[in-house]
């Protein structure tokens, strides 16, 4: 006899279930994504007024478009300020490089 003696009981290896043998779940129903539907969806979401907030007796709706326009203008103001700061920095860097190049050329 060759090899080590076997004292444990022999187990028959069982195959693990394959990922590909499983039945896949059904796919969800796809929504209509045509251009007309997307345009209509965007306009519907924008034109609906917000629900009244605060006391339920006050059922007047807010001026949502004016509030949205004010927020947009405020955002644009902040972005323009950032852009101006970046342009100032770029001009200052370019000016410093030009001065340094001018000094280097005058030394020669």
Image (spheres, rainbow, N blue to C red):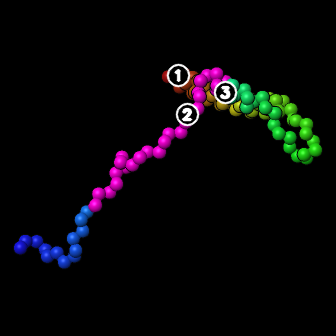
* Residue 61 seen from this side: yes
Q: CA distance from mark 3 to mark 2?
A: 47 Å
Residue 29 placement, left or right of 48: left
Question: Which of 26 and 106 lies nearest the eye of the viewer?
Answer: 26
Residue 19 placement, left or right of 5: right
Residue position marked by numbered label 1 in the rendering:
105
Task: Kindly report which numbered mark, 1 or 2, lies closer to the viewer in this rendering.
Answer: 2
Kindly check if marks 1 and 2 are in contact, taking CB atoms under 8 A apart as contact: no
Residue at position x 69%, y 25% in the image? 40
Q: Was residue 68 drawn as part of the magenta stretch in this picture?
A: no
Rendered image: mark on residue 30: 2
Q: CA distance from mark 1 to mark 3?
A: 27 Å
- Magenta highlight range: 14-39
Residue position marked by numbered label 3 in the rendering:
87
Q: CA distance from mark 1 to mark 2?
A: 68 Å
**Where is residue 60 shown, x and y percent of the image?**
91, 37
**Where is residue 73 shown, x and y percent of the image?**
78, 29
């Amino acid at each position: 006899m060759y090899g080590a003696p076997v004292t444990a009981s022999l187990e028959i290896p069982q195959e693990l279930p394959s990922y590909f043998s499983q039945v896949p779940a059904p796919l969800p129903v796809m929504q209509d994504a045509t251009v007309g539907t997307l345009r209509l969806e965007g306009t519907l979401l924008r034109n609906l007024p917000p629900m009244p907030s605060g006391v339920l007796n006050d059922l007047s709706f807010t001026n949502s478009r004016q509030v949205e326009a004010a927020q947009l203008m405020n955002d644009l103001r902040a972005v323009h300020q950032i852009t101006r700061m970046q342009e100032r920095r770029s001009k200052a860097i370019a000016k410093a490089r030009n001065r340094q190049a001018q000094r280097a050329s005058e030394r020669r």
